[in-house]
Amino acid sequence: MKNINVLHLIGGSLRGGAARGAYWLFRELIRKGVEGVVLNNTKSAREHDGVLGPRGSVENMRFRTRAMLEQSHKLLHPNRERTSFNTGFYGIDVTESPYYRKADIVHLHWINQGFVKISTLPHIKKPLVWTFRDLWPGTGGCHYPMGCEKFVTGCSACPQLGSSKAIDLSSRVFANKRINIPQHLVGVGISNWVVDNLKQSPIFARNRIKMIPNAIPIESFFPEEQYAQRKRLDLPETRPIVLVGADSLGKFHKGFDLFQSCLHHLPKGVLILTFGHNDSVDLRDFDHRHLGFLSRIDELRAAYAAADVFVAPSRQEAFGKTLCESMASGTPVVAFDIGGPSDIIEHQVDGYLAKPYSPEDLANGIRWLLDENNRPNVRLAAIRKIRERFSTSVVAEQYIALYKSLLA
C-alpha cells in the first residue's frame, strides 16, 4: 500500500489543551510515514511544522469573525452558565481546500470556535475520522453535560443556557448535527467514558465509535532530578509539594473548588503549587505558589518533577492529559474515579483514585502518596504504564491500523 495521506483539522491554539495533544499525534504519524498536513484556524499554526493557518490578515479576520459569530448566539441566554458552548453553525468547508484533493482520509479533531461548519460534513466523500476529545460532538452545544442526560434523547431546555424552552439553541444545535453527521464517519473516543456516552447520543446512532486513548510524547515527558527542578523554580528543597494545574483552573468541571476543600485535611507544611490560567482562583489562606500558564514543555516537565504529588480534581474529564504528563515525568497522581482518569490510573498501584467527589478522600490520596513507603513503587509503575499504553508511538500505530482498515 502506498503511503497514506491524511488531512487533519485541529482548531484552537496548539500551545496547549486538546489541540496540542492532537498535534503530538500528527507529528508521530509523520514520523511513521503517514503523509499529510494540519489545517488550523489560529496564528499559532505558523510556529509548528506541517501546520497551515490563516493566510494573511484577511483570512485571519474571517476566522476571528466566525469565532465571534459562533459565540454570539449565547448572548440571547443571559442566564447561561459560564461554561464552554459551541454551535458548529460557522466555519470552513474542508472540501474547498486543495489539500482535500490530495488526502486519502480526512481526520477531524477539535473543530470548534467557528472552525468547521457541521452542515458541510456531508460534502466529504472520503473516509472520515473524528477524534472525540470531549462530549460536544454528541450534545446540543455543551462540552461536558455535568449530569444532564438530555443528549441521550435530544437536547432542549438546556440547563447550561438557563433555558426552559423546548425549542432553544441547544435543540437547534442538536438537530443540525443529527441531520448532517454522515453515516460513513468513524468516531474515536479518547476514553471509554467518551465512547460510552456518545454511543447513547442519537446523533451517532448510525456510526461506528471505537476507543483509542490520547497520547503523550515520552521523549518530552520523562523523569528529572527533583532537587534540580526545585532549584530552577526557586522552591524549597525539602518541603512536600502538591501540584495542581490545567489550561484554565476556574472551569467548573475542573473541580478546583473540591481541591480547595481538601486542603483543610492536609498536614501542615505542605506547599501548594499551581499552573494554568488563574481565573480568579483564590488560595490566599494557604502557602501557595502560582507558576502562571506554562506553554513550554520544559516548564511543564520542571513543575511535575518538582512536585511530590499531582492532583487532578475534575468533576468530569474526557481523558486527563495532565495526568499522563505527570505520570510520565515520574510524579504520581490523585484523581477522582470518574471518566478518563479511571482508564489511566490503577488504584494504589500507579496512582490513587478517590471517591467522587469527596474532598476528604482526595486528601487521603495525597497523604498516601506523600508517604515515602508508597511513592517509589507507585512512581515506577506510573512511568511504565504511560510508556506501554499511552505513548505517541503506541497510539499512532492504532490510528494507522484504523486508517488501513478504512482504505482496504
Image (cartoon, rainbow, N blue to C red):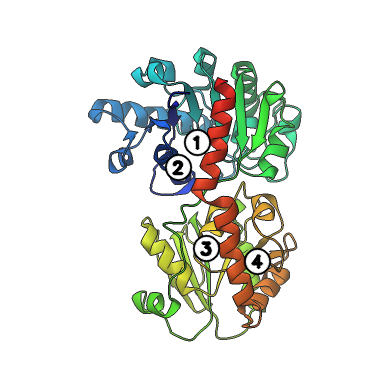
Badge 4 crowding class, 10 Å Cα cut-off, few under 14, some 14 to 19, many 20 or more, is many
Q: CA distance from mark 3 to mark 2?
A: 18 Å
Viewer can see residue 169: no
Query: N-terminal of the two: label 2 or label 4?
Result: 2
Residue denoted by label 3 = 326
Q: Residue at x 73, y 38 (%)?
A: 196
Left/right placement of residue 323 relative to residue 156 reads left
Q: Quadrant of residue 205?
A: top right
Where 254 falls versus 371 (above or below)? above
Give the secondary structure at mark 2: helix
Give the secondary structure at mark 4: loop
Viewer can see residue 32: yes
Give the secondary structure at mark 1: loop
Q: CA distance from mark 4 to mark 1?
A: 29 Å
Q: How many marks?
A: 4
Q: Residue at x 62, y 61 (%)?
A: 313
Q: Give me the disc on residue 351.
A: 4
Residue denoted by label 2 = 19
Query: N-terminal of the two: label 4 or label 1?
Result: 1
Residue denoted by label 1 = 110
Q: CA distance from mark 1 to mark 3?
A: 23 Å
Q: CA distance from mark 2 to mark 1?
A: 7 Å
Badge 3 crowding class, 10 Å Cα cut-off, few under 14, some 14 to 19, many 20 or more, is many
